[in-house]
Amino acid sequence: MFDFDDLKDSISDFTQKKPLLLAIICIVVFLFFAGLIILMIQTTPVKKTEFKEAEPFTQDAPVLIPDSPDIEKEYYPNRITENQWSKEEINKWFTYPEEETMKELEKANDKIADDITGAAP
């Protein structure tokens, strides 16, 4: 049977008697593995990515919006805008501010105006 204690002792003697030779052997082994890794990286084939040709853009083509949770379903990238809102649109989108909110806004605006014109003669 192989005696590991003898191997351990011989390695210990070698490292104590010839440390320079051990350092050179370690450097050579390291360079060998580094070169092997570099060679493997350089010789691996490059994966080719294939791109589909882009379709030519025309102004009449419909805009394709991808499905996404960020984009609302009623999103229109291009639409004809009217000059005035209809009564239904006013009721749907516009909310009249409360009287209390309007008074607070008026006070805030008055304060800004007073700060600006406060030092004026």
Image: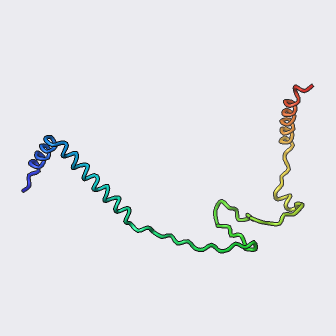
As drawn, 71 above or below 58: above
Q: Give how far across and how far down residue 113 sits, in percent.
A: 87, 33
Is 45 left or right of 99, judged from the image as shown?
Answer: left
Is 17 left or right of 34, judged from the image as shown?
Answer: left
The residue sitting at 84% across, 47% down in the picture is 97
Quarter of the view holding residue 81: bottom right
Front-most of residues 69 and 37: 37
Front-most of residues 106 and 121: 121
Is 100 left or right of 33, judged from the image as shown?
Answer: right
The quarter of the rendered structure image containing the C terminus is top right
The residue sitting at 41% across, 68% down in the picture is 45
Quarter of the view holding residue 40: bottom left
Front-most of residues 6 and 111: 6
The residue sitting at 74% across, 64% down in the picture is 77
Total number of numbered discs in the rendering: 0
Quarter of the view holding residue 93: bottom right
Q: Give how far across and how far down residue 20 sits, in percent.
A: 19, 43
